[in-house]
Amino acid sequence: MDTQSFKTFSATPDDIEHDWYVADATDQVVGRLASRIARVLRGKHKPTYTPHMDTGDYVIVTNADKVRFTGRKEQDKQYMNYSGYPGGDKYESPEEVRASGPEKIIERAVQGMLPNGPLGRDMFKKLKVYASSDHPHDAQQPEPLHTA
């Protein structure tokens, strides 16, 4: 068998096409939804996936206020934010985060599943989260993201 005929594909900026997907978060479990979204943002669902390139697609998440947690996480889970100053740590429960901005729940879950650094930040910018079912991206003709 000739090993010279098999070449590993590595995407270049000319090879990359970004599609648009829309996901409805109604009654979806946060972690399971976030892992599917992170996979699409990273581009791992495509045969052209290249680890060092942003080959992923755009994802629009609607109805972020209707996402759910399993078990007692809605009451027991704590989101921690640290200002960098002594005593500057602040804790919020998912109930409090949902009241102030339900988009933050999904954004924070997805961001934790993306790589750290400039590439991960570029991938995260392709995530658009909205609390209601309305979004301003109809011109991009997003396809439904199958999350079930």
Image (cartoon, rainbow, N blue to C red):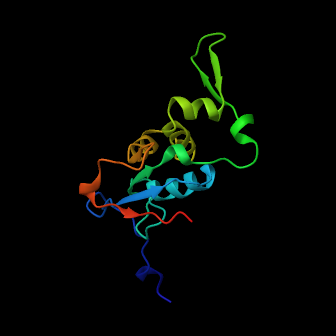
In the depicted view, which residue is nearer to us: 104 or 62?
62
In the rendered image, residue 54, in percent from the top left (x then y), is placed at: 39, 53
Q: Position of residue 139 (x, y in %)?
A: 23, 56
Left or right: 22 with respect to 110?
Answer: left
Residue most toward the bottom?
1
Q: Residue 42 vs residue 72: left or right? A: left
Residue 40 at least partly seen: yes
Residue found at x 72% / y 41%: 73
* Quadrant where the C terminus is found in the figure: bottom right
Q: Determine whether 60 is above or below 4 in the image.
A: above
x and y percentages locating residue 147 in the rendered image: 53, 63
Q: Position of residue 27 (x, y in %)?
A: 59, 54
Q: Can residue 110 be seen in the rendering of this structure?
A: no
- Above or below, 86 relative to 148: above
Question: Which residue occupies the foreground of this view, 120 or 147?
Answer: 147
Q: Is residue 48 above or below residue 110?
A: below
Residue in the foreground of this view, choosing between 94 and 35 = 94
State whether residue 7 is above or below residue 15: below
Is 2 left, or right, of 34 in this rendering?
left
Residue located 30% across and 62% down the image: 17
